[in-house]
Amino acid sequence: MLADRMKTLAPSPTLAMQAKARAMRAQGIDVISFGAGEPDFDTPARIKTAAIRAIETGQTKYTEVGGIPEVRAAVCQKLKRDHGLEYSPDEVTVSCGAKHTLYNIMMALVNPGDEVLIPSPYWVSYPEQVRLLGGVPVPVVTQEATGFDLDPAALRRAVTPRTKMVILDSPGNPTGAVFSPEALAAVAKLAVERDLWIVSDECYESLTYEGRHVSIASLSSEVKARTIVVNTCSKAYAMTGWRIGYAAGPRPVIRAMTDVQSQVTSNPTSIAQWAAVEALGGPQDEVAKMAGEFDRRRRVIIEALNAIPGVTCVKPKAALYLFPRLDPKVYPIKDDQKFILELLETEKVLVVQGSGFNWIHPDHIRVVFLPNADDLTEAIGRIARFLENYRKHHGTN
Ligand SMILES: Cc1ncc(COP(=O)(O)O)c(C=O)c1O
């Protein structure tokens, strides 16, 4: 039968919901999706052209496992340009999306029994990847009152002699939080003191609307020496399907990750790598344009959600997500999975349940602010109608 590790593996709840919505659409049902964190823009033309050129010039063979020299050089330039971080190409490895990059890191660093601290609510894949390797994910709760900022005191309390690593997802999914400079400085201090690895997932950095994203690796050379910076072309360049993620970090870790990759996938797609060279190294104006449009949608949707009775929404500083709270007195939700399925079935609007991100209170949902303006107004109208009916049938207020 199946391996023991499969007993604890939870499939991605976000992908499961997306599959359900896709099946409904295939039946001709008009579903509005607030589910997947996938920019709705097309990949910019200059990037597509680079990929076409790669095909036409025969760049269609195996490449270096961790990426062609050009793509690793482009990553180095990007990290220098955006964060003043100096890496050499042998401190960079490129893989099939950041999800794959993260898994390579876990393979390279996590031993069975090692504890990995993960600020919660968190992106669904971190704990599953840790568990697959016999590690122990340790959630460290953040507070809505602080905009889900990292709580350094809680993090410190969670450290044990088995703690190996802390994963930072900032700007974060599912809350859109950007960890404050004070919190980052405190984590950096803790990591140095307790000899911890820091994995800094910066996939949403280009979609920062308020404040500035700081890469923790840029705080000092001591911190950089224990940090693996992870990023992707998926979100910044609307390239989710191309599958290009990358990491920069200390040479032995990067080498180990690349060795793992050499036995599992070999190189990421050669054509996508050439597209990534153009994405990372070319003019960056579309990134700001996309971010500007997402920011506009963010403002519209926060206002619309906050106008619904019993709904409050912390303003996310970045990323593509809102994590609104539905007052349990108004909406007494016992099973949030059932609740969102009901919303999908009655109003054909897809959101994801808060518990899918390890949020223990069944009173939050994750909403992606992706649909364009018309869909947005229509979708919020549908959510409001659903909540009003829910309140009438279940609520006390
Ligand atoms: C926080 C976070 N990290 C990493 C990823 C992975 O992105 P990709 O594998 O497309 O590069 C995602 C995707 O949704 C994410 O939300």
Image: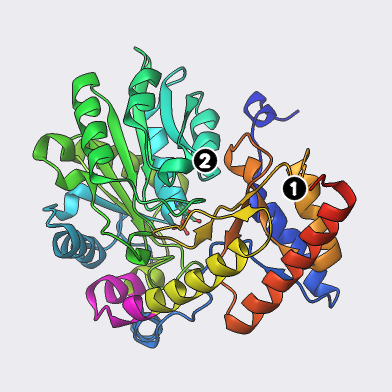
Q: Would you say residue 60 is visible in this rendering? A: no
Q: Is residue 361 left or right of residue 163?
A: right
* Front residue of 110 and 121: 121
Q: Residue at x 80, y 54 (%)?
A: 341
Bounds of the magenta span? 275-289
For label 2, the crowd category at 10 Å Cα-Cα, with few meaning under 14, some 14 to 19 and many 20 or more, is: many
Residue at (35% x, 66% y) in the render:
209
Q: Mark 1 sits on what residue? A: 330
Answer few, some or many: residues within 10 Å of disc 1's Cα (few below 14, many 20 plus, some between 14 and 19). some
**Identity of the amino acid at label 1?**
Val
* Closer to us: 30 or 342: 342
**Magenta part, dominant SS:** helix
Within the magenta stretch, is there residue 285? Answer: yes
Type of amino acid at the residue the image marks with label 2: Pro
Q: Circle 2 is placed at which residue position?
A: 121
Rendered position, 220 above or below 110: below
Please tell me whether residue 10 belongs to the stretch shown in magenta. no
Image vertical order of residue 135 relative to residue 285, above or below? above
